[in-house]
Image (tube, helix red, strand yellow):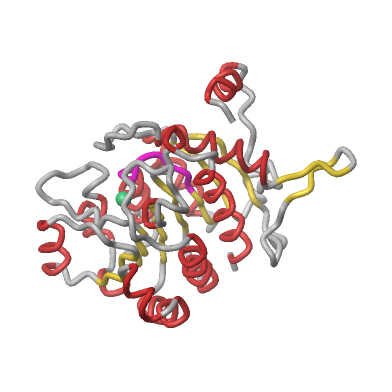
């Protein structure tokens, strides 16, 4: 899909809803998908994470849905998506997060957010914490985002939300490129970390058991796409080799969702650096797998 093609579509205001949406009725919906196309707090050399919600929606319609006798037919996850009512809320701006998440969380709907840069997760976690606290945060990322010398940006997300989460039931998965001050902070706050080497050594089944034992109530999953190896997810803002395989990441994600989550996000997809839209496509498939695993 060429960029010019997409820009023409944006101009014509033909934004499609994600293919997994099956209701327009907010009240009826159980899962609410929304985009937050903002990268104002990114310091990445690679720009373009704000285009991700648009690309994920487009690619879901192009590759995860087919036309059968004039009707839409989805390429479902293996167990289907159940009877879940899924709404595509469209895009919101960062300053609408408080208001929109108050609406979603107070009705016990599950939000699935497409970012945007990872700092958006901080605003979401703070908004959700007003209703449900503390959160058990599961943080999939190549980076710990535990910088404390600079704050309120995409590299300090986990540090910025420390007051809002229960550290005993929170953890980081996929970490492989901490800076020294982040290593110091991981130790200082005694944060549990599962590296890609741990997963290689112990296997996903054992790792998933230990994750499920660790996490508590009010589980929020923040998924930075760079936790996945660049071979599977090249279109991210800050790629790091030696990451999780796509299927390992989604296996763990599904296990967590099956046990129960209050919301999740997928951040840092960067379509302008993608290869044949494979990272946006992975994000779309991940969303379908999460829907199929929601209780
Ligand atoms: Mn991150």
Residue 181 at x, y = what percent?
Answer: 10, 56
32 vs 159, left or right, is right
- 72 is higher (above) or lower (below) than 206: above
Q: What stretch is highlighted in magenta?
A: 113-119
- 11 is higher (above) or lower (below) than 137: above
Residue 110 at x, y = what percent?
Answer: 53, 56
Residue at the location (59% across, 22% down)? Answer: 5
Q: Which residue lies furthest to the right in this view?
A: 69
Residue at the location (54% across, 40% down)? Answer: 277
Residue 257 at x, y = what percent?
Answer: 51, 67
Number of marks drawn: 0
Residue at the location (61% across, 39% down)? Answer: 59
Quadrant housing the N terminus: top right
Residue 51 falls inside the magenta stretch: no
* In the foreground, 284 or 109: 284
Residue 114 falls inside the magenta stretch: yes
26 vs 185, left or right, is right
75 vs 145, left or right, is right
* In the foreground, 277 or 37: 277
Q: In which quarter of the image is residue 201?
A: bottom left
Residue 90 at x, y = what percent?
Answer: 56, 36
Residue at the location (39% across, 76% down)? Answer: 211
* In the foreground, 261 or 255: 255
Quadrant housing the C terminus: bottom right
């Amino acid at each position: 899909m060429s960029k010019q093609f997409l820009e023409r579509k944006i101009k014509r205001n033909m934004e499609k809803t994600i293919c997994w949406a099956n209701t327009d009725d907010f009240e009826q919906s159980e899962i609410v998908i929304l985009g937050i196309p903002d990268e104002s707090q990114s310091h990445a050399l690679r720009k373009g994470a704000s285009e991700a919600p648009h690309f994920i929606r487009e690619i879901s319609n192009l590759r995860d849905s087919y036309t059968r006798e004039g009707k839409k037919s989805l390429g479902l996850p293996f167990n289907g998506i159940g009877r879940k009512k899924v709404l595509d809320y469209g895009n919101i701006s960062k300053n609408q997060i408080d208001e929109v998440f108050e609406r979603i969380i107070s009705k016990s709907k599950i939000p699935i957010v497409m970012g945007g840069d990872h700092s958006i997760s901080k605003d979401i976690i703070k908004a959700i914490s007003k209703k449900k606290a503390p959160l058990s945060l599961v943080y999939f990322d190549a980076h710990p985002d535990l910088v404390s010398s600079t704050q309120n940006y995409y590299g300090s997300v986990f540090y910025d939300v420390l007051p809002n989460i229960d550290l005993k039931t929170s953890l980081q998965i996929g970490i492989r490129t901490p800076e020294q001050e982040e290593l110091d902070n991981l130790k200082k706050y005694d944060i549990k970390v599962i590296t890609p080497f741990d997963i290689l050594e112990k296997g996903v089944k054992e790792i998933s058991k230990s994750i499920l034992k660790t996490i508590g109530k009010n589980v929020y999953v923040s998924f930075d796409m760079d936790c996945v190896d660049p071979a599977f997810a090249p279109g991210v803002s800050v790629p790091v080799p030696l990451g999780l395989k796509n299927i390992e990441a989604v296996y763990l994600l599904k296990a967590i969702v099956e046990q129960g989550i209050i919301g999740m996000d997928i951040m840092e997809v960067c379509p302008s650096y993608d290869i044949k839209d494979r990272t946006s496509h992975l994000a779309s498939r991940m969303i379908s797998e999460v829907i199929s695993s929601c209780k």
